[in-house]
Image: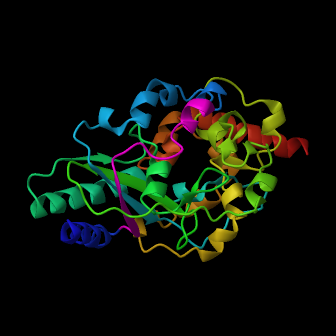
């Protein structure tokens, strides 16, 4: 068991991941908080969070023969900075490069194939963000890092600039100790959030979160009381991460796919608002920025332009 665990971790690093931890496929600590969060309607219009709540809380409904969860983290930080120019939009750092889902899934497939070569009896399932799995809790249980007060996972080595993914396998392994919460008395992220989306430590109301409003909120116009605080964010938001003291340990990633395309760091708002649907799809093909769809993306760009013109 010890040798197989060590070999799997070596393979994970060889595949290009920057951190790996392994935990037993048992309900992670704090998973009951999901039900409380849903009852408060903090998930907004993300109905899939509620639809698959049972699977999120019981991994065996996702994979009946689950015994171990291999958690990996992939550093995506690059040194470029957001623009403070009112004529340019801000896009969350994680979307500056290629779509991380595709990058990580390819590496996970390679890793699982290599694991099966070590032991052909192992069955496995890949999970990259879209699976009904509470990945931050699993990563915390596997020792990758801890869930900060802004709800994002923080690692000692890379701060919070990491993507997470998992492989669930049908084999018992040697398990890592859970990560210790190192936020202490710090409340920098809570104080910095312009919309007060972090209602209390470790609890985020998505209805007020700029990332949610610019990516997942697709039903109608963004409320004026929140739109006026968007500070040129047109896709996602990095404010709570930018102020986190642990992010002084950030390291530039060696993954070339995450290095930014120049028109994604600080795109000109007036050029974006002229995009038609075909132009939007072409521009953001293989990018997370395709997520909200053309109508909602342009809606957000117009909101930011209108806010700037009224100031």
Q: Is residue 73 left or right of residue 6?
A: right
In the image, taking residue 113 as reference, residue 56 lies left or right, namely: right
Task: Report x, y in % for residue 46.
Answer: 55, 29
Q: Is residue 181 left or right of residue 242?
A: left
Identify whether 278 is placed above or below 143.
Answer: above
Residue at the image point whose x is 79% and y is 43% from the top: 195
Report the front residue among 42 and 292. Answer: 42
Instruction: State the extent of the magenta-drawn residues as a range.
Output: 17-37
Magenta span has 22? yes
Query: Residue extending furthest left?
Result: 120
Percent x, y for residue 236? 62, 48
- Quarter occupied by the N terminus: bottom left
Could you tell me residue 203's position as x and y percent? 67, 43
Q: Name the spot of residue 32 as percent of width and height, x first.
A: 53, 36
Residue 209 picture quarter = top right
Q: Residue at x 63, y 65 (%)?
A: 182
């Amino acid at each position: 068991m010890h040798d197989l665990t060590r070999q799997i971790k070596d393979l994970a690093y060889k595949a290009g991941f920057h951190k790996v931890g392994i935990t037993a496929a048992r309900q992670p600590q704090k998973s009951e908080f999901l039900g409380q969060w849903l009852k408060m309607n903090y998930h907004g219009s993300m109905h899939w969070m509620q639809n698959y709540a049972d699977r999120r809380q019981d991994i065996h409904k996702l994979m009946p023969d689950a015994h171990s969860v291999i958690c990996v983290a992939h550093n995506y930080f690059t040194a470029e900075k957001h623009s403070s120019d009112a004529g340019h939009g801000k896009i969350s750092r994680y979307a500056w490069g290629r779509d991380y889902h595709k990058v990580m899934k390819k590496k996970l497939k390679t890793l699982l194939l290599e694991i099966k070569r070590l032991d052909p009896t192992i069955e496995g399932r890949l999970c990259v963000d879209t699976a009904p799995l509470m990945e931050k809790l699993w990563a915390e249980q596997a020792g990758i890092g801890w869930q900060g007060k802004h709800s994002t996972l923080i690692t000692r080595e890379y701060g919070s600039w990491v993507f997470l993914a998992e492989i669930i396998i049908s084999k018992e392994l040697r398990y890592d100790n859970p990560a210790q919460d190192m936020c202490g008395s710090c409340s920098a992220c809570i104080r910095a959030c312009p919309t007060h989306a972090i209602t209390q430590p470790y609890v985020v109301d998505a209805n007020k979160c700029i990332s949610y409003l610019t990516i997942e909120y697709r039903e109608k116009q963004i409320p004026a009381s929140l739109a006026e605080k968007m500070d040129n964010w047109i896709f996602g938001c990095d404010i709570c991460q930018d102020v986190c003291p642990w992010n002084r340990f950030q390291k530039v990633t060696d993954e070339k796919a995450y290095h930014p395309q120049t028109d994604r760091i600080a795109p000109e708002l007036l050029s974006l608002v002229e995009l038609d649907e075909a132009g939007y799809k072409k521009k953001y093909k293989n990018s997370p920025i395709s997520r909200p769809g053309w109508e909602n993306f342009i809606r957000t760009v117009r909101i930011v332009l209108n806010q700037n013109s009224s100031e």
